[in-house]
Image (cartoon, helix red, strand yellow):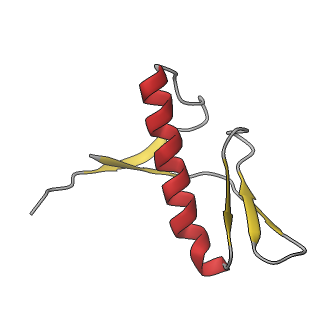
């Protein structure tokens, strides 16, 4: 089951091109994207990786990080 999260994101254009994306409620979360179109994909991948790491380490997610909804997924 996948969850949907709403996160405040800060996109900072970089002088050499691309963007650095951070989240003020999750300080250790950071990712990059070359284009605005890549932002959503990279953000989703970074969030999934950090949630997995938290689960493996037995850490609780930041209190401000609450799922909006859960999606049931089925494998075909």
Along the line of sight, the residue nearer the viewer: 19 or 70: 19
Direction from residue 32 to residue 12 in the image, left or right: right
Of the 4 image quadrants, the one containing the C terminus is: bottom left
Q: Quadrant of residue 64?
A: top right
Q: Quadrant of residue 18?
A: bottom right
Furthest-right residue in this view: 15
Q: Position of residue 41 (x, y in %)?
A: 51, 68
Direction from residue 17 to residue 42 in the image, left or right: left
Q: Position of residue 31 (x, y in %)?
A: 66, 56
Q: Position of residue 73 (x, y in %)?
A: 21, 55
For the point 86% across and 76% down, the residue is 16
Would you place residue 59 above or below residue 46 in this image? above
For the point 48% across and 22% down, the residue is 57
Would you place residue 37 above or below residue 32 in this image? below
Would you place residue 36 above or below residue 28 in this image? below
Furthest-front residue in this view: 16
For the point 81% across and 78% down, the residue is 17
For the point 70% across and 49% down, the residue is 23
Furthest-top residue in this view: 58
How many callouts does the rendering have? 0
Direction from residue 8 to residue 16 in the image, left or right: right
Q: Quadrant of residue 20?
A: bottom right
Furthest-left residue in this view: 76
Direction from residue 11 to residue 70 in the image, left or right: left
């Amino acid at each position: 089951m996948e969850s949907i999260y709403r996160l405040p994101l800060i996109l900072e254009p970089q002088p050499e091109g691309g963007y650095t994306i951070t989240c003020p409620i999750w300080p250790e979360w950071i990712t990059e994207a070359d284009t605005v179109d890549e932002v959503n994909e990279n953000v989703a991948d970074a969030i999934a990786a950090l949630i997995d790491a938290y689960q493996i380490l037995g850490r609780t997610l930041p209190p401000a990080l609450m799922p909006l909804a859960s999606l049931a997924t089925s494998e075909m």
